[in-house]
Image (tube, rainbow, N blue to C red):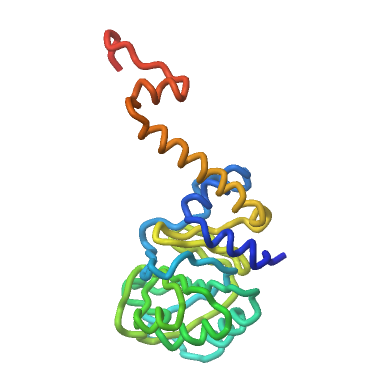
Amino acid sequence: MALTQAQLDELRSIDTPTILNAIETFGVRPNTLGFTGTNVRYLAPDMGVLLGYAATALGDTMSEAAPKSPDGMFQMWEAVDETPNPVVLVIKDFSDDPTHAVHAGDGMATFAKVLGADGIVTDAALRDLEGIKHAGIKPFARGLAPSHANNRIVRAQVPVTIDGMDVNPGDLVHGDENGLCTIPLEVADKVAAVAKQILEAEEATRQSYLAPGFDLDGYAKQRNLQRRNPARGF
């Protein structure tokens, strides 16, 4: 079931690392899964947190012999239109050259926004960055490249993996300048409350570090740890 607008707004007010910290407390997946690495970056972090339900697609712009057809692209737009708002359009590249494969520019970004998208995520490239930003689409990609080459979408609404993060159609995707994660739907309505508790606890810990005279002895005492005996070495 889709979250309420208030629930979405709460999640959007929290950074992605803290969202992941909160997800860990529910034990619904291994802590090593559900997030991207260093190959996909937020190209406009000043636009704020990305949040939406995934509409997925497979794209290939770098194959010369591949038949070009509007069918795949239309399937993708149908997926965006039929996914609950807000939508994150997730395009998986399966060409041999993701550094040159460009899967969206300002035109596609504008149409995606009209259909309810909050952002576009791809493990390849985007182009027309200023136009994408002007359209109000939050862009996550490997980087930028100037040509759409042989732009085509092959299939829509299939499971994809983006920089190590598995995404299924309808998954809830959250992202900021730190990267992206999926929020398991079975706990999505509880994550924000736990995340806020974590933020409060982290701030209290930071303030304790800044207290006059706090040092490693204080840190050890705080955590019931024993400092080593120098006589026995490490």
The residue under the point 62% across, 50% down is 193
The residue under the point 57% across, 44% down is 197
> What residue occupies the far top of the structure in this picture?
231
Give the quarter of the figure containing the N terminus: bottom right
Vertical order, 174 against 131 (above or below): above
Give coordinates of residue 129: x percent, y percent: 35, 79
Q: Nearer the viewer, residue 212 or 167?
A: 212
The residue under the point 47% across, 37% down is 204
Give the quarter of the figure containing the C terminus: top left
Q: Nearer the viewer, residue 175 or 198?
A: 198
Q: Nearer the viewer, residue 3 or 77?
A: 3
Vertical order, 121 against 34 (above or below): below
Give coordinates of residue 45: x percent, y percent: 38, 66
Q: Quadrant of residue 138?
A: bottom left
Give coordinates of residue 3: x percent, y percent: 67, 64
Image mark count: 0
Vertical order, 45 against 117 (above or below): above
> What residue occupies the far right of the structure in this picture?
1
The residue under the point 47% across, 62% down is 175
Vertical order, 167 against 80 (above or below): above
Give coordinates of residue 14: x percent, y percent: 51, 56
> What residue occupies the far front of the structure in this picture?
212
